[in-house]
């Protein structure tokens, strides 16, 4: 075992603090990675504070990881020492269920192994994430990162990027379609950038007038305030697709009414409480309310290559690791444009 430096939380009401972590020695199919940058996802906060339940303490968050290969196992053939690589939201799966065989490891029927606060496929070894100096991951779940783009801005693509790219591809959102993006945060700003690059007509829906300038600068074609009743009325039956990125409680019915016939509303955010849905909003327009997780490894690599080709990255604010607790509070207050990324060189 290797002793490495990390930041961890030891209970739901304690801040993250320095923690010495045991990492396994790389086996024959493993890749050891020195972490350069790690994005801060809202999921990190939910997990650290046990808001979804099931947090195993101490927890080391982080699943938007970019780094450099430092060691490889004897059977690794896709990577070599010095390569720039990434690790996303999960680090293993069963490999033999229907979903794994279809390259949808994120929906592994036997339970995929998330990058942190999860169990490896032995169902007993706890995973620890990217708020650490190094990570060891089986080769299949390591991703190639292009050096064309600034690496700190690539890190959030490993979650926010693929979470928005995957549903756009799955539901075949295409040039000329009308898409509304609800919420302009870490996920929302990536949905705007990627959809616009595909030729989609994008409208950002928000209750914050201060978001309009940012939305248009990101490439959105339109911006509408959702707390103005007249706006909601005029947008009825307008959109082919809605991507809802909001994790705060809100009424889905208000947005379902904005879909055209056969329209699809895709949920990416996870509000803390269940939401009532009026059946007529679905039946009356043959509309669909669906959800989507991240993509599989093959699709995530496709997304990374697409973003490199189209010069798409996240808008980030760099922080040192000792600023992480403040960054959590600022994230909750919406005071980040649009993703915090930790410079792991600051982990001393």
Image (spheres, grey):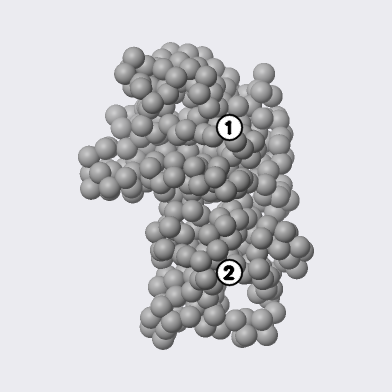
Q: Which residue is mark 1?
A: 147
Q: Is residue 252 visible?
A: no
- Residue at image x 66%, y 81%? 231
Q: Is residue 206 left or right of residue 1?
A: right
Q: Earlier in the sequence, mark 2 or mark 1?
A: 1
Q: Quadrant of the N terminus?
A: top left
- Residue at image x 47%, y 13%? 2
Q: Residues within 10 Å of mark 1 (few under 14, many from 20)?
A: few
Residue 14 horizontal/vertical position (percent): 62, 36
Residue 334 horizontal/vertical position (percent): 70, 54
Element type at mark 1: loop
Element type at mark 2: strand
Residue 62 horizontal/vertical position (percent): 54, 36
- Residue at image x 57%, y 57%? 197
In depth, the one of 86 and 45 nearer the eye is: 86
Eyeballing the image, is 218 above or below 4?
Answer: below
Q: Is residue 227 left or right of residue 90?
A: right
Q: Is residue 95 visible?
A: yes
Q: Which residue is mark 2?
A: 201
Residue 63 horizontal/vertical position (percent): 51, 38
């Amino acid at each position: 075992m290797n002793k490495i430096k990390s930041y961890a939380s030891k209970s739901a009401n304690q801040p993250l603090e320095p923690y010495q972590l045991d990492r396994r020695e790389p086996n024959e199919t493993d890749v050891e990675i020195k972490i350069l940058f790690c994005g801060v996802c809202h999921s990190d906060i939910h997990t650290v504070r046990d808001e979804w339940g099931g947090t195993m303490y101490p927890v080391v968050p982080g699943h938007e990881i970019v780094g450099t290969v430092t060691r490889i196992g004897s059977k690794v053939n896709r990577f070599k020492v010095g390569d720039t690589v990434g690790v996303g939201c999960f680090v293993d799966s069963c490999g033999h269920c229907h979903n794994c065989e279809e390259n949808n490891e994120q929906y592994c029927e036997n339970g995929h192994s998330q990058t942190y606060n999860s169990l490896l496929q032995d169902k007993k070894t706890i995973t620890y994430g990217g708020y650490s100096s190094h990570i060891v991951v089986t080769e299949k779940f390591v991703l190639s990162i292009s050096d064309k783009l600034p690496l700190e801005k690539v890190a959030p693509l490993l979650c926010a990027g693929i979470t928005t790219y995957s549903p756009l591809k799955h539901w075949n959102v295409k040039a000329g379609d009308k898409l509304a993006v609800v919420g302009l945060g870490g996920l929302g700003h990536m949905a705007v950038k990627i959809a616009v690059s595909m030729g989609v007509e994008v409208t950002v829906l928000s209750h914050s007038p201060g978001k309009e300038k940012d939305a248009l600068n990101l490439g959105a074609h339109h911006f509408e305030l959702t707390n103005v009743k007249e706006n909601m009325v005029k947008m009825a039956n307008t959109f082919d697709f809605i991507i809802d990125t909001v994790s705060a409680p809100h009424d889905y019915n208000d947005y379902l009414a904005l879909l055209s016939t056969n329209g699809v509303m895709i949920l990416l955010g996870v509000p803390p409480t269940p939401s009532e849905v009026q059946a007529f909003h679905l039946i009356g327009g043959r509309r669909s309310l669906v959800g989507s997780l991240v993509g599989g490894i093959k699709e995530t690599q496709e997304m990374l290559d697409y973003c490199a080709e189209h010069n798409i990255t996240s808008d980030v604010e760099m922080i040192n690791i000792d600023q992480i607790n403040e960054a959590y509070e600022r994230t909750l207050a919406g005071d980040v444009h649009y993703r915090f990324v930790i410079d792991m060189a600051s982990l001393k």
